[in-house]
Image (tube, grey):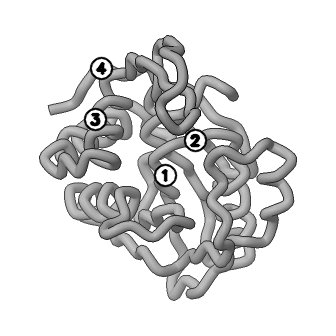
Amino acid sequence: MAVEIHPIQIWGNWDLGFSLDVHVVKSIPLGEDDYGHQQFSNTRSAIGELLYQFKYKQRYDYLQEIVDTIISFLDTHSEMKGVNTILPVPPTKNRGYQPTFEIADKLATELNIFCCCDVLENVSQVEAKGLSFDEKKKLNGSIIKRKMATRRHNTLLIDDLYDTGTTLNQCVNALRQDPLIDKIYVLTVTKTKNQ
């Protein structure tokens, strides 16, 4: 079942992109923990809470609701209809499972289109989370394309969280090297309020 969202258009070197909603609606500082890390009481958007629970609390039962919300969004945006391939943004951090891969794979299954999780690779060992915009720009070239397309198609690039767009722009730069990729659309589940 889809949750209420407030889509936000995001801009980059792709043809069209959206975030379904902000990740955090309200954040109240609580002070530092025993290790000196600032703690917050966060109120997340409905989709932000689903993503948080799925990604960090291993609530796999929320995957279907996330995918249902994406499908509901795509159904109302005809400009993104011609997609016939879904690619997830590659992770920097190795986890027991990759949330973005799981979302992309489930979405592709539901839409009955192709998903490939090994087209793009992040060769950097530096996680972009927490870096400044200038530090993120220095990671340029950390995304490489491992496979060429075998047929002409439009691609939907999926990510869980949009911050500065640096990683997404690098992914699109790598994909644009392939003459068989026509349109590249971007969809992120949530975005930070910073941008």
Foreground mark, 2 or 4, reads: 2
> The disc labelled 4 sits on which kind of residue?
Glu
Please give the residue where the numbered disc 3 appears in the rendered image.
50
Q: Amino acid at mark 1?
A: Asp
- Using the rendered image of the protein, determine whether residue 4 is visible from the camera's viewpoint: yes
Q: Earlier in the sequence, mark 4 or mark 1?
A: 4
Asked whether residue 179 is in view, the answer is no
> Nearest the camera: 65 or 38?
38
Q: CA distance from mark 1 to mark 3?
A: 14 Å
Q: Residue at x 39, y 17 (%)?
A: 43
- State the CA–CA distance, disc 4 to disc 1: 19 Å
Q: Position of residue 3 (x, y in %)?
A: 25, 25
Q: Mark 2 touching mark 1, by CB under 8 A?
A: yes
Q: Rounded to the nearest whole Å, what is the CA distance between mark 2 and mark 4?
A: 19 Å
Kindly identify the residue that appears in the image at 38 percent across and 30 percent down.
48
Name the quadrant of the N terminus: top left
- Looking at the rendered image, the quarter that the C terminus falls into is top right
* Left or right placement of residue 133 versus residue 168 in this view: right
Q: Which residue is mark 1?
A: 159
